[in-house]
Image (cartoon, grey):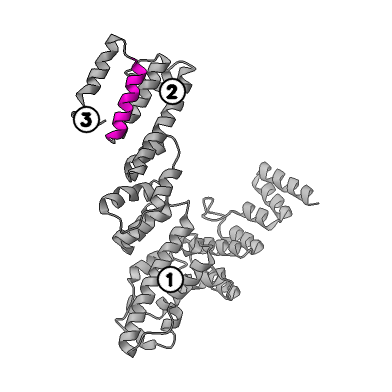
């Protein structure tokens, strides 16, 4: 806690006046007003709590946790702590200090005011404002999308991709992926447009990656590329979990661009995405409903040609997840039983869950009986009775 050694002597005199019958509550209110005026909000917080201890007959110097206070004083004191933290945090926000406000709102479980303040920031804000806020927004999850936007704007795509990979994001994950994909797409489209204008003497009439590369094979010489390929590779790995159509449409064009790069800019991926631009492109194509059967055939072949002892369950898991996304539940059950029976911790729904998704309660009952799973057996029988 920071104390102000220059605090006016009259405040100390006012405190001394208590010995001559001064009103302690009034003096604490006076101190609080002075701390607000001096913007010493941490001391304001402590003053509010000291006043509550005084009013409740508790020790003015707190030497034990509030949890040890007797009832009803404990309950009243904890409510006073919430109100004091909310007031202190709000004052810090009003002064533009998001980083100092956050501990108070975090302590009382109220992130929304801080989230709202973060939402108003732009990457062009001063470094001393942005840098302390990024960990709060992104790593602590107060506003992950805005946090990633600030990282991207302040430090660039490489740092943004690294941060997203290091800190698993659940809330706002799709929006974060869209931000990465759309930013990479914009960078690529801009670089392609400049290369075309330099080569053809005029700006292209389209701004889409697909339109820019169409009919321009000269763009793809042996040493030509227009966006960092490692960035592109890093972003592609997040596509299988994407549900936003606008993200998938942009990603499809990124894959189309990547397929046309020369061999030296191709890279090897992990099965079943050994040829990432082709394989992720096929996966996205299926999710978009564009010749989904061809994409399914592509990944079926991957499963048939793979050796689980070499590549593990990933090809089969990928196919099952794709089948689930396309609502081909019966085939997903078949693949799960045939290829994933030896992987109880598989990264996709297990056969019992897939039977439930398919509404195939007879098969669910049969599998549950085989596995001695009486609860799943009960669920199947109950579901069948409800359906009937």
Residue 332 visible in the picture: yes
**Snapshot quadrant of residue 98:** top left
Residue at the spot of label 3: 4
Kindly identify which numbered label has been placed on residue 375: none
Give the spatial CA distance, label 3 vs label 2.
Answer: 26 Å
Type of secondary structure dominating the magenta stretch: helix
Residue 43 visible in the picture: no
Taking depth in this image into account, of 343 and 23 the one nearest to the observer is 23
**Snapshot quadrant of residue 43:** top left
Q: Residue at x 33, y 63 (%)?
A: 157
Q: Which residues are magenta?
A: 23-38
3 or 2: mark nearer the eye: 3
The residue sitting at the top extreme is 20
First in residue order: circle 1 vs circle 3: 3
Taking depth in this image into account, of 311 and 293 the one nearest to the observer is 293
Q: Is residue 88 left or right of residue 320?
A: left
Kindly identify which numbered label has been placed on residue 276: 1
Give the percent coordinates (x, y) of residue 313.
50, 59
Q: Is residue 354 left or right of residue 285?
A: right
SS category of the residue bearing label 2:
helix
Q: Quadrant of the N terminus?
A: top left
Q: Is residue 30 in the magenta section?
A: yes
Q: Is residue 354 in the magenta section?
A: no
Give the spatial CA distance, label 1 vs label 3.
Answer: 61 Å
**Snapshot quadrant of residue 60:** top left
Residue at the spot of label 2: 77
Q: Is residue 81 above or below residue 206?
A: above
The residue sitting at the right extreme is 388
């Amino acid at each position: 806690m920071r104390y102000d050694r220059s605090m006016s002597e009259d405040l100390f005199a006012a405190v001394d006046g208590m010995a001559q019958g001064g009103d302690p509550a009034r003096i604490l209110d006076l101190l609080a007003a002075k701390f607000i005026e001096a913007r010493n909000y941490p001391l304001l917080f402590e003053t509010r709590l000291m006043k509550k201890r005084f009013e409740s007959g508790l020790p003015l110097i707190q030497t034990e946790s509030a949890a040890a206070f007797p009832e009803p004083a404990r309950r009243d004191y904890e409510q006073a702590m919430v109100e004091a933290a909310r007031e202190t945090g709000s004052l810090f926000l009003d002064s533009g200090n998001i980083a100092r406000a956050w501990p108070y709102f975090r302590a009382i479980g109220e992130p929304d005011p801080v989230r709202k303040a973060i939402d108003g920031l732009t990457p062009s804000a001063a470094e001393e404002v942005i840098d302390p806020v990024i960990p709060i927004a992104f790593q602590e999850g107060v506003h992950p999308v805005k946090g990633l936007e600030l990282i991207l704007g302040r430090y660039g795509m490489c740092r943004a991709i690294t941060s997203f990979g290091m800190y698993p994001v659940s809330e706002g994950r799709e929006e974060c992926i869209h931000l990465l994909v759309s930013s990479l797409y914009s960078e690529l489209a801009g670089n392609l447009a400049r290369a075309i204008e330099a080569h053809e003497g005029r700006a292209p009439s389209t701004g889409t990656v697909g339109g820019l590369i169409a009919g321009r094979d000269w763009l793809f010489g042996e040493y030509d590329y227009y966006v960092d390929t490692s960035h592109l590779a890093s972003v592609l790995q997040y596509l299988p979990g994407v549900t936003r159509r606008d993200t998938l449409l942009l990603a499809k064009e990124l894959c189309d661009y990547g397929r046309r790069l020369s061999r030296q800019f191709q890279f090897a991926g992990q099965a079943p995405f050994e040829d990432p631009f082709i394989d992720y492109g096929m996966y996205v194509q299926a999710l978009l409903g564009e010749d989904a059967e061809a994409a399914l055939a592509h990944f079926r072949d991957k499963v048939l040609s793979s050796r689980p002892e070499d590549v593990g369950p990933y090809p089969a898991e990928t196919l099952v997840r794709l089948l689930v996304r396309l609502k081909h539940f019966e085939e997903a059950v078949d693949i799960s039983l045939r290829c994933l029976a030896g992987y109880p911790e598989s990264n996709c729904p297990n056969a019992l869950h897939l039977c439930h998704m398919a509404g195939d309660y007879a098969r669910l009952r049969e599998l549950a009986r085989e596995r001695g799973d009486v609860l799943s057996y009960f669920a199947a029988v109950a579901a069948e009775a409800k359906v009937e």
